[in-house]
Image: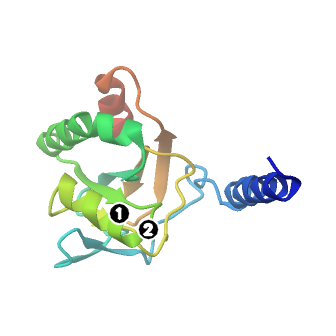
Amino acid sequence: MSRSRVAGITAAVAAVVIAFAARKAAPPAGAGSFRGMQMTTADGGVSVDIAKCPTKRCLLTYVAPWCGYCRAGMPMIKELRSILRTQGMESWIVVGLDQDPAVKAYAREIGADALVDTAHAIEPGGVPHFFVVDNNGSILRHIAGLPPDPNQLIKFALKD
């Protein structure tokens, strides 16, 4: 391999590392808010203010099209939404961290009520990422990754 090719690859890797290092991590619980953030549904028909949770608390699940864990965990995430609704807690699934066509396509796969973050308004600091927010949009707690036991997510979401 030529020196110029190695230098080009090294520069590209360095740029990616710097870009990821510069990204803001998810805000600590109690310090962040989703106030003023509007997301549209996958079908583009509805704009949702994610700071206006219609229940006492909401679960916002952030996923990305390229995330294998997100895709593998989607049946569990959808089941979690159903369980939380029976407990009086609303939830949203937000798709982002990719180019607009991929974000919109994955959101449509999830369902018409999935929200798209094409403006990159949320920087979750890892996906999948689960945020519990109050009805003013304040982040109460958050966690990245899929736990091995779905009941852990239910307890995390419903915890007072």
Give the amino acid type for the residue marked by disc 1 in the picture.
Ala
Q: Residue at x 67, y 55 (%)?
A: 20
- All told, the count of numbered labels is 2
Q: Residue at x 75, y 54 (%)?
A: 9
Report which residue position mark 1 lands on: 102
Rounded to the nearest whole Å, what is the CA distance between mark 2 and mark 1? 6 Å
Q: Relative to 127, is 30 on the left or the right?
A: right
Tell me residue 70's x, y (percent).
Answer: 36, 41
Are the residues at dot 2 and dot 1 in contact (C-beta closer than 8 Å)?
yes
Q: Return the mark for residue 93.
A: none
Q: Secondary structure at mark 2?
A: loop
Which quadrant: the C terminus? top left
Q: Residue at x 40, y 52 (%)?
A: 62
Report which residue position mark 2 lands on: 99
Along the line of sight, which residue is nearer the eye, 133 or 150? 150
Q: Relative to 89, is 60 on the left or the right?
A: right
Q: Quadrant of residue 100?
A: bottom left
Q: Secondary structure at mark 1?
A: helix
